[in-house]
Image: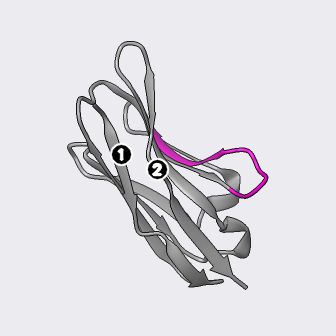
Amino acid sequence: QVQLVESGGGLVQAGGSLRLSCTASGRIFSINTMGWYRQAPGEQRELVAVFTSGGSTNYADSVKGRFTISRDNAWNTVYLQMNSLKPEDTAVYYCYVKHGAWYTDHWGQGTQVTVSS
């Protein structure tokens, strides 16, 4: 059973920083994509930052230059460093992994990030 557990969310003022962590456990192999999505109230879930196969990264335009995704060498933990936060970054942030021969998806339970103006 694959489990993704996020931590690090919270309330921060605009301009502040937060660091999210996602720890993965279970049978995860041949990772195709791993990273972060977010969903604001009344909005669709959207990509924030992910690692793709081969280790390259993909960022949403809205977070480029402010957010940085990183990971440990074993792909057990993925981080999202969020700087210069804006109120529009307020959302539930979800950890995501796609892996295996059948590109199976898994999601974490989500962690709330609230940025006050």
Give the mark toward the camera: 1 or 2: 2
Whether label 1 touches label 2, CB < 8 Å? yes
Q: Is residue 98 left or right of residue 61?
A: left
Residue under label 1, please give it: 4
Identify the mark at residue 109; answer none if there is no mark. 2
Dividing the picture into quarters, in which one does residue 91 lie?
Answer: bottom right
- Characterize the local packing of mark 2: few (<14), some (14-19) or many (20 or more) Cα atoms within 10 angstroms: some
Q: Residue furthest right?
A: 42
Q: Is residue 54 above or below residue 113?
A: above
Residue 47 shown in magenta: yes
Magenta residues (range): 40-51
**Residue type highlighted by circle 1:** Leu
Q: Is residue 17 above or below residue 21?
A: below
The quarter of the image holding the N terminus is top left
Q: Is residue 60 above or below residue 84?
A: above
Image coords of residue 8 (percent x, y)? 41, 69
Q: Is residue 58 left or right of residue 91?
A: left
Image coords of residue 38 (percent x, y)? 61, 52
| Residue plotted at (54% across, 56% down) | 93
Identify the mark at residue 35; answer none if there is no mark. none
Whether residue 39 is visible, yes or no, is: yes
Image coords of residue 78 (percent x, y)? 35, 52
| Residue plotted at (35% across, 52% down) | 5
Q: Is residue 82 above or below residue 115?
A: above
Q: How is the image coloured?
A: one colour
Judge by depth and name the residue closer to the eye, 55 or 111.
Answer: 111
Q: CA distance from mark 1 to mark 2?
A: 8 Å
